[in-house]
Amino acid sequence: MNPTDDHTVAIVLSAEEYDAVHAALTAGAGPRTGGRPPTLNSLLEQWSGIAAELEQEDYSDCAPEFHNSIWCRSALAKVWPLLPPRVRSIRQPELDRIDEQYRRATVPLPGRPEEGAGWWSRRVPRRLEAETSEYREGGWPLGWESTPFPKPAAVEVITWG
């Protein structure tokens, strides 16, 4: 294979940059299962996975589970300012792309700021899935009824059963 045909560029980090990334993850994300901090790659992969899932499928879990699923974005927010500037600049386009995908797949909560710290936690999936018997007053399905405002019109609840 001719190296000039390959459009991917290998980014090589220095030992100091790797150490700084590890320190940022330890300080910002803290330990998870097994007592080890996640990797930057694993956080971005989790965030990409939830954004893709929300864009392609109806979300069937409850509100607390949704907030647990987006923990990775909160961890990224804590870690990001601690990362070496070169690492941030290399990974920023990827984070921006995933954030935009997540915005397309979700709806902002009424009366809440759409930008600023924690913006991802003030959004709900555009499409929620629930059994017909789980549909509740205010338009929310079971597991979302504790949401302190009526369901936004842009949120579609797909029922089955």
Image: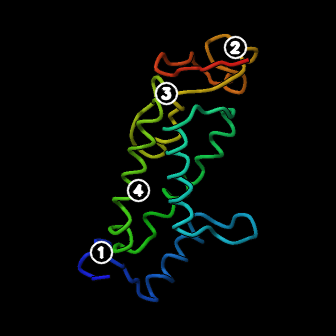
Say if mark 2 contacts mark 4, CB within 8 Å: no
**In the figure, is residue 22 to the left or right of 30?**
left
Disc ID at residue 136: 2
Residue 157 % position (x, y): 59, 20
Front tag of 3 and 2:
2
Q: Mark 4 or mark 1: name the one nearer the start of the chain.
A: 1
Q: Amino acid at mark 1?
A: Asp
* Front disc: 4 or 1: 1
* Residue 20 higher or lower than 46, as above or below: below
Q: Earlier in the sequence, mark 2 or mark 1?
A: 1
Look at mark 4 in the image and give the residue it sits on: 95
Say which quadrant the N terminus sits in: bottom left
Q: Secondary structure at mark 4?
A: helix
Query: Is mark 4 in CB contact (under 8 Å) with mark 3?
Result: no
Q: Position of residue 64 (x, y in %)?
A: 69, 37
Q: Residues within 10 Å of mark 1 (few under 14, many from 20)?
A: few
Q: What crowding class fits label 2: few (fewer than 14 Cα within 10 Å), some (14-19), or many (20 or more)?
A: few
Say whether disc 4 or disc 3 marks the residue closer to the N-terminus. Answer: 4
Tell me whether circle 4 and circle 1 mark residues in contact (CB < 8 Å).
no
Q: Nearer the viewer, residue 112 or 6?
A: 6
| Precedes in sequence: disc 3 or disc 2 | 3
Badge 3 vs badge 2, beta-carbon distance below 8 Å: no
Which residue, given by chain and number where applicable, does mark 3 sit on? 109
Report the Cα–Cα distance between label 3 and label 1.
Answer: 43 Å
SS of the residue under disc 3: loop
> In front of the other: label 3 or label 1?
1
